[in-house]
Structure formats: structure tokens, C-alpha cells
């Protein structure tokens, strides 16, 4: 009996000791968290002072007031070195019901969506599920065009016809809402085969067909819908919880969703809205800041892959503007990339995301009422350079 009491005594002593150790560990952990938080605030305050964030914010506010006078309706975010310099929501998400835009409002990114499609392709390439020098026929044997590589799609050098015009009569007369896989089937079955514009890799020609096919390739290589793949492998891993592909069945897309307006009218669903990859991402300015950080920090793809994406690949027309894989590039006289960006326009929405890897700043404007002032960002770029004149043109619309 004494031995039993001894075992019980030892057991309770052990439990008490473990409890004390746990409390000690917890008690030391809490102050560290407070210290870390305070340190982060001090670091942010120092960065804000170093980059003159308050001065820049006041100057950007003046510019945005001018844009408002020009009809801008949407959201803006400008950040540098992980500090938000300026962030604001303007106007209405839904004019009829007078629902205002908020910072969490979701906008159709239009062609800015191509940046996501290109990264998805590079991610699958790193995993060996796609090959940049493989042709579309390697994955879709019935595709009617030879020699069109994944690489030529990424940099708009495929020479393919525009799907919107090629199948427009079929779509509108039949009142069809095709998917990416429908487009692939239509190309395969078309008689006669729609004529090319150029041979592959012969000439740069910006073309939504390229990115619609790339999204179909993502589906083929991953075995998932484009929506599922992007959500599981791109959006959620970097915390983009408010971003969706427009075809999603997830009803969360409708929380703070905006609608596109042009000429004072809300635009209805377009016949081509369910073709994605060339467009179709809905996102917020804050999620796009996470996207910028993921690109900068090589969170989703390797540094080598991203460097390949921002390598200029279009030299037919000499000038400062160029294209890589899914990114527009602003280059210097030696064709070295200075700025990385993409614009977008689709059914009342126009967008831009513009960033400078050297100065570590990003400029994001999302609008749901068509207004070309979205693309006039030279003054903001100059402000982010501390008032120095940049080589960026006033209007950089390339759509």
C-alpha cells in the first residue's frame, strides 16, 4: 500500500512540475510577442520616415482628387518597402443601389489576370507538368496549329487568330457562354481551320487567345478546373483570401463584389466572361499587395523562373515598352527592365498594377467605371522616386 501511495505522490509531483514549466514557458512567450510587435512598429515608423511616406501620401491625394474630377471610380493602393503609403476607396461598387466601394471591394482585373496565369504556368513547369518548349499539340493532339509552344503563348508570339472574332458569330447567334475547353474544341473542329496571323515566334502580337489556351493547359496539366487550381495553388498559399476566378461556385466572390459600368450603364454578363486566363480574376487592392510581395519574394516560383518572366522578348519595334511572360515591361535604352506592370480593360473595368523592383514600390489602381485616367500614373511614379522625373509616359495603356 505504501508503494501505491509513493507512485501517486510521484505522479502528482510530475504533473505539477510540467504545469509549472508550461506556465513559465507561456509567461516568457507573451512578453516576447509584445516586444516583437513594438519592434515591428518601430521599424515601420523608421521606414515611413526614411521614404517620406506622409509627404508622398499627401501628394498622391492631390493627384487622386484630380482623377476624381476626371471621373475615376474605384480603389487605390500605393506601397513601398512593406509600408502602405496611400490606400483609399472611391465611389460606388453598385450605382443603382448606392453601395459604396470599400477597401475589400472585389474588382474584375481584366488583363491584369494574365500575370496570375503566367505564374501558374511557370509553377507547373517547375514541377515538370508543363514544358515551355512543348507545343499545344503535345497536350491537345487535335489542336490544328503546329509549332505553337507554351513559350510562344506566354510572350504573345504564337501568331494565332483571336478567339473572340473567330467564334463571335457562333457565340452570339447561339447565345453561348463558352469555357476555355469549349474554345479548344472549337479550334479543333473548325472547318476550314481559321487562318493564322503569323508563323509562331515570327512577330509579337498581343492576343487574348494565348492566355485562354494557357488556362486550358493549366487545367489539362493539373487535372483541376482553372478556378480550383488557382485557389489552391496561387491565391490561398499567399493569403489572397478575397480573390477568385469569375467562374467560381464559391459564393464568397459576391461579398463586396463590384459591377462594371461604361457610358453610365451597368454592363451585363458578356458571352466571353467564362473564358478565363486572359481575364477573369476578381481581387482587391490589399490582395494585390500580397501578390506583389509574393512575386518580389519568390514565394510561389523560384527566383530563376521570375527572372525569365521579366526578360524582354519583343524587339520588332524599338522603344521603352516590351513584354516578357505575362508581364509588360518598361525597359531602358539597353533593354534592361526598369519597371514591371500590366494593365487591363474588360466591360467597364480598367486596372493597372505597376512596380519598381529597385525602389521596392507598387502602384495599384482598380476601377469599375471605365475611365482612362487609371492609366495616367506618371505623376505617382515620379512622387515615389522622390520627385525625380521618370521615363514613364503619362498614359501607358497597351491593351
Image (cartoon, rainbow, N blue to C red):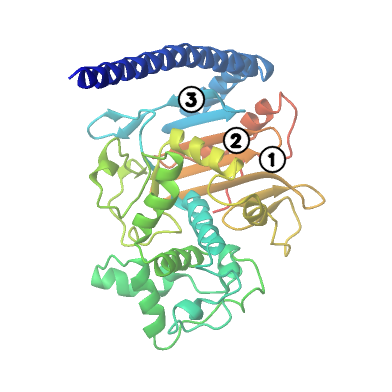
- Who is closer to the viewer here, 159 or 355? 355
Does residue 323 lie above or below 69 as drawn? below
User: Label 1: how many residues lie within 10 Å, few (<14), some (14-19) or many (20+)?
Assistant: some
Residue at 32% in and 39% down: 258
Any part of residue 320 in sight: yes
Q: CA distance from mark 3 to mark 2?
A: 15 Å
Q: Position of residue 332 (x, y in %)?
A: 78, 47
Quadrant of the image for the C terminus?
bottom right
Q: Which of the pair 253/297 is nearer the observer?
A: 297
What quarter of the picture does the N terminus occupy?
top left
Residue 172 position, x and y percent, is 29, 69
Residue name at image x 26 percent, y 68 percent: 176
Q: Helix, strand, or loop for circle 3? A: strand
Name the disc covering residue 125, or none. none
Q: Are marks 3 and 2 in contact (CB under 8 Å)?
A: no
For this rendering, which residue is in front, 9 or 48? Answer: 9
Q: Report the residue at 48% width, 63% height from top.
A: 211
Establish if 104 lies above or below 220.
Answer: above
Number of numbered discs overlaid on the protein picture:
3
Instruction: Give the residue number, with chain letter if any, for mark 1.
Output: 392
Task: Specify the quadrant of the image occupied by residue 298.
Answer: top right
Q: Is residue 203 left or right of residue 4?
A: right
Looking at the rendered image, the disc whose residue lies closer to the viewer, 3 or 1, is 3
Q: Quadrant of residue 106?
A: top left
Regarding mark 2 in the picture, which secondary structure is present there?
loop
Q: Which mark is residue 87?
A: 3
The answer to whether marks 3 and 1 mark residues whose Cβ atoms lie closer than 8 Å is: no
Number of the label disc, if any, that sits on residue 377: 2
| Marks 2,1: beta carbons within 8 A | yes
Amino acid at each position: 500500500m505504501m508503494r501505491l501511495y509513493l507512485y501517486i505522490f510521484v505522479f502528482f509531483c510530475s504533473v505539477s512540475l510540467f504545469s509549472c514549466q508550461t506556465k513559465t514557458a507561456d509567461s516568457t512567450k507573451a512578453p516576447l510577442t509584445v516586444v516583437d510587435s513594438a519592434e515591428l512598429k518601430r521599424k515601420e515608423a523608421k521606414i515611413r520616415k526614411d521614404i517620406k511616406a506622409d509627404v508622398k501620401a499627401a501628394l498622391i491625394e492631390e493627384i487622386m482628387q484630380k482623377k476624381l474630377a476626371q471621373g475615376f471610380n474605384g480603389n487605390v493602393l500605393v506601397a513601398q518597402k512593406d509600408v502602405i503609403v496611400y490606400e483609399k476607396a472611391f465611389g460606388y461598387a453598385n450605382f443603382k443601389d448606392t453601395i459604396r466601394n470599400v477597401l475589400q471591394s472585389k474588382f474584375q482585373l481584366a488583363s491584369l489576370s494574365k500575370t496570375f496565369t503566367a505564374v501558374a504556368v511557370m509553377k507547373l513547369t517547375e514541377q515538370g507538368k508543363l514544358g515551355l518548349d512543348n507545343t499545344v499539340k503535345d497536350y491537345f493532339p487535335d489542336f490544328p496549329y503546329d509549332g505553337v509552344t507554351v513559350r510562344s503563348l506566354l510572350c504573345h508570339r504564337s501568331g494565332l487568330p483571336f478567339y473572340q472574332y473567330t467564334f463571335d458569330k457562333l457565340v452570339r447567334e447561339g447565345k453561348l457562354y463558352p469555357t476555355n475547353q469549349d474554345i479548344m474544341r472549337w479550334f479543333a473542329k473548325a472547318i476550314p481551320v481559321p487562318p493564322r496571323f503569323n508563323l509562331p515566334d515570327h512577330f509579337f502580337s498581343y492576343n487574348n487567345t494565348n492566355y485562354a489556351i494557357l488556362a486550358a493547359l493549366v487545367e489539362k496539366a493539373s487535372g483541376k478546373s482553372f478556378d480550383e487550381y488557382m485557389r489552391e495553388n496561387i491565391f490561398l498559399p499567399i493569403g489572397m483570401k478575397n480573390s477568385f476566378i469569375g467562374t467560381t461556385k464559391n459564393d464568397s466572390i459576391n461579398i463586396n463584389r463590384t459591377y462594371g459600368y461604361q457610358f453610365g450603364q451597368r454592363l451585363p454578363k458578356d458571352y466571353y466572361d467564362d473564358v478565363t486566363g486572359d481575364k477573369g480574376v476578381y481581387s482587391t487592392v490589399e490582395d494585390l499587395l500580397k501578390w506583389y510581395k509574393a512575386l518580389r519574394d519568390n514565394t510561389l516560383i523560384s527566383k530563376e523562373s521570375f527572372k525569365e518572366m521579366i526578360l524582354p522578348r519583343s524587339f520588332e519595334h524599338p522603344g521603352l515598352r516590351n513584354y516578357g511572360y505575362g508581364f509588360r515591361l518598361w525597359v531602358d535604352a539597353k533593354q534592361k527592365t526598369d519597371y514591371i506592370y500590366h494593365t487591363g480593360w474588360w466591360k467597364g473595368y480598367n486596372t493597372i498594377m505597376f512596380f519598381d523592383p529597385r525602389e521596392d514600390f507598387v502602384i495599384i489602381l482598380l476601377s469599375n467605371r471605365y475611365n482612362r485616367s487609371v492609366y495616367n500614373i506618371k505623376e505617382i511614379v515620379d512622387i515615389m522616386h522622390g520627385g525625380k522625373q521618370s521615363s514613364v509616359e503619362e498614359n501607358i495603356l497597351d491593351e
